[in-house]
Image (cartoon, helix red, strand yellow):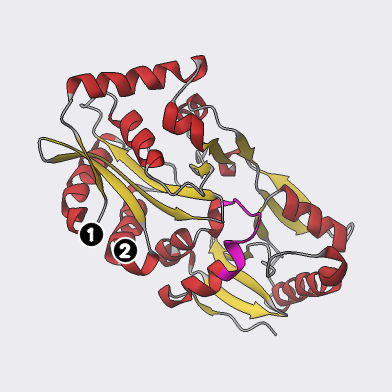
Amino acid sequence: MIFFRDIDYTDRDLVQQYTLLSECRNCDFNFMNLMSWRFLYNTQIAQHRGMLIIRFLFDGKPAYLPPLTPPPYVEETMREEYAAVLLDLVAEAEAERQPFLMMGACQGMLGRLQSVLPGKFQATADRAFTDYIYDRTALETLAGKKLQSKRNHANRFEREYPHYEYRELTPDLAKECWKLEEEWAAKHTDMHARLDADDEQHSMRRVFKHWNELQARGAAILVDGRVVAFTFGGPINYDTFDVCCEKANTDYEGAYAIINRDFVRHLPEQYTLINREEDLGLEGLRRAKLSYQPKILLDKYTITCS
């Protein structure tokens, strides 16, 4: 039996013990995401056979993220234990009379599953779940022909608002950020069913409320003392930072380009890759994310038993 319990803010060090030194760059493993969306997915964790297991609800049915092993993963010594954990998860699903469902398996994790239990699982990928990962230098410089339009937007913002202020995001700015969020939500009513505006706002409130516990990092752009753009996120692993939220007032042309560029410029140098998460199957969001020229399109597979 695997003993699951609700994930809590005090579990940050435990979760990051498994994630920060790993090669996993999937935004689903960002502790901020795990906590801020717990209300929707009923997220739970367990330590089992020395590995960390994350369970949640998807469409009302139990699902798992791939088990996390203490880094580094050494196949020769952990192969049997990893296979045993997978079989335990399958057995648990069967005991609850539920189909086995694992989500968020990237290529490396998928290879590991197939290696330790060949023929046991089948995998499918949904493009809406693919993570967009960018080269940090490209985002902070916007250099080159392919990013010329983004560079032009940023330059125009600087010309129009030469005295704009970049400020580190702290809880005392939450009220001003919230005003911008409400204005943004009123203009964007075409939210995907997976992520409606109420759910997103609930997640954001949890981040602002528990800012210090999450060790959140963010920024705001102010013009004449007014917040016109803000963003925040947290680390996935040692070299990849996850941008969880980014909002801007489009009446200020170039506000998105500026908050995107300037925030990356202020991140610690260790983060050479920037994960800007999924497009949720929204065509407009997909075009926007592709326009920034991702370095990696990180497919995430759904795993079921063959």
**Dividing the image into 4 quarters, which one contains the C terminus?**
bottom right
Is residue 131 depicted above or below 32 in this figure? Answer: above
What predominant SS class does the magenta segment belong to? Answer: loop
Residue 48 is one of the magenta-drawn residues? no
Q: Position of residue 6 (x, y in %)?
A: 49, 77
Q: Is residue 202 left or right of residue 268?
A: left
Q: Position of residue 210 (x, y in %)?
A: 32, 67
**Dividing the image into 4 quarters, which one contains the N terminus?**
bottom right
Is residue 20 depicted above or below 48 in this figure? Answer: above
Residue positioned 15% across, 30% down in the render: 163
Name the element at disc 2: helix
Q: Is residue 195 left or right of residue 63?
A: left
Residue 24 is one of the magenta-drawn residues? yes
Name the element at disc 1: helix
Q: Which residue is mark 1?
A: 171
> Residues at badges 2 and 1 in contact (C-beta under 8 Å)?
yes
Q: Within 10 Å of the Cα at label 2, are there few (<14), some (14-19), or many (20+) other Cα atoms? A: some
Q: Magenta segment range?
A: 17-26
Q: Amino acid at mark 2?
A: Trp
Q: Which circle marks residue 211 in the picture?
A: 2
Q: Is residue 242 left or right of residue 175?
A: right
> Which numbered disc flags the more N-terminal residue, 2 or 1?
1
Q: Is residue 68 left or right of residue 260?
A: right
Residue positioned 53% across, 55% down in the render: 236
Is residue 51 depicted above or below 120 in this figure? Answer: below
Q: Position of residue 140 (x, y in %)?
A: 43, 33
Q: Amino acid at mark 1?
A: Pro
Asked whether the viewer can see residue 285, the reply is: no
Question: To which quarter of the image does residue 238 belong?
Answer: bottom right
